[in-house]
Amino acid sequence: INAELKAQIEELKNEKQHLIYMLNLHRPTCIVRAQNGRTPEDERNLFIQQIKEGTLKG
């Protein structure tokens, strides 16, 4: 049982490291959105509005 628990702990540590890495990759996106004061929903609505108005530039 002890060996199995140690293996689970090691697996969880690896998963934690992976999740921390993924959060750090995403952090710049979150900071930019926070500075703009827009949520992803706001951005989606703006995109839809631009499509409807034909003002979306590629």
Image (spheres, grey):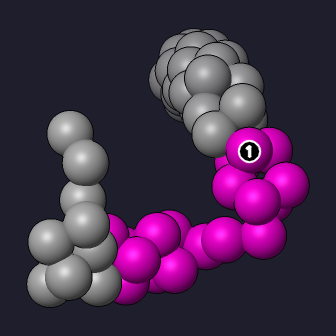
Where is residue 13? Give x, y as percent. 67, 21
Tell me which corner region of the image, top left, top right, bottom left or bottom right, holds residue 44: bottom left
Q: Quadrant of the N terminus?
A: top right
**Magenta run includes residue 33:** yes
> What residue lies at 61% left-to-right and 73% top-to-bottom?
39
Q: Quadrant of the C terminus?
A: top left
Tell me which corner region of the image, top left, top right, bottom left or bottom right, holds residue 50: bottom left
> What residue lies at 85% left-to-right and 55% top-to-bottom?
35
| Element type at mark 1 | helix
> What residue lies at 80% left-to-right and 44% top-to-bottom?
31
- Seen as rendered, the residue at the extreme right is 35
> Is disc 1 surrounded by few (<14), some (14 to 19) or many (20+) residues within 10 Å?
few
Front residue of 31/24: it is 31
**39 versus 15 height, above or below:** below
Residue that label 1 marks? 32
Front residue of 50/28: it is 50
Where is residue 10? Give x, y as percent. 62, 15
Front residue of 56/2: it is 56
**50 versus 57 height, above or below:** below
Residue 5 visible in the snapshot:
no
What amino acid is at disc 1? Val
Where is residue 43? Give x, y as percent. 46, 70
**Magenta run includes residue 41:** yes
The region drawn magenta spans: 30-48
For this view, does 25 lie left or right of residue 55?
Answer: right
Where is residue 15? Give x, y as percent. 55, 26
- Magenta span main SS: helix
Residue 32 visible in the snapshot:
yes
**55 versus 8 height, above or below:** below
> What residue lies at 15% left-to-right and 72% top-to-bottom?
54
| Total numbered badges shown on the rendered structure | 1
